[in-house]
Image: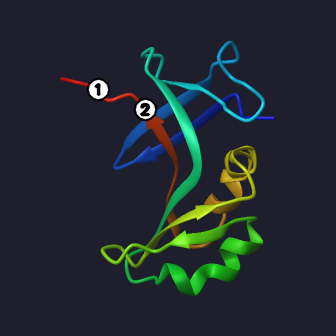
Amino acid sequence: MFPEQIEFVTDGRRTTFRLRRDLTRDDAPVYEIDGSGVEARPNGSVWIRFAEGTDAASRAADIAAAGYRIERVPGYAPNAAFVTAGSIADALARLDSLRAIAGVEVVEPQMLTERQFR
């Protein structure tokens, strides 16, 4: 139901989330970040960013064709949007369909983690 592994690259840094089957429930997946022991829980929202100069809202039809809808486009980044699918499982299962949209540079599922102190 949930992907075993989710990978994405942001600003040249690869992040890998691995599903923790021992902690995952039907509607609440738990992932471990980069084998660190730090747990992360997806909230069902995905951050996408288009190339500079592309208005994310104008790409709503492409986003819908990928199985998502725009939740909001932040004022500070009109070329980006938070999008969601019908469920957390749907949002995670369709990440490649967002990556396939022309002009998309970043696709990053939003994960909740415990606060980390340095």
Q: Nearer the viewer, residue 116 or 78?
A: 116
Task: Please say if the residues under marks 2 and 1 sit with CB atoms less than 8 Å apart.
Answer: yes
Left or right: 115 in relation to 48: left
Q: Quadrant of residue 89?
A: top right
Q: Residue at x 67, y 32 (%)?
A: 28
As displayed, is residue 47 above or below residue 23?
below
Task: Judge left or right: residue 50 versus residue 69.
Answer: left
User: Mark 1 belongs to which amino acid?
Assistant: Gln
Q: Secondary structure at mark 2?
A: strand
Q: Position of residue 57 (x, y in %)?
A: 53, 83
Name the residue tied to disc 1.
Answer: 116
Residue for badge 2: 113
Q: Position of residue 109 (x, y in %)?
A: 54, 48
Residue count near mark 1 (Cα–Cα under 10 Å), binned few <14, some 14–19, many ≥20: few
Residue projecting furthest to the left: 118
Quadrant in the rendering for residue 83: bottom right
* Residue depicted at x 42% and y 76%: 79
Q: Decide: is 24 above or below 14.
A: above
In terms of depth relative to the viewer, which is nearer, 110 or 98? 110
Image point 22% across, 24% down: which residue? Answer: 117
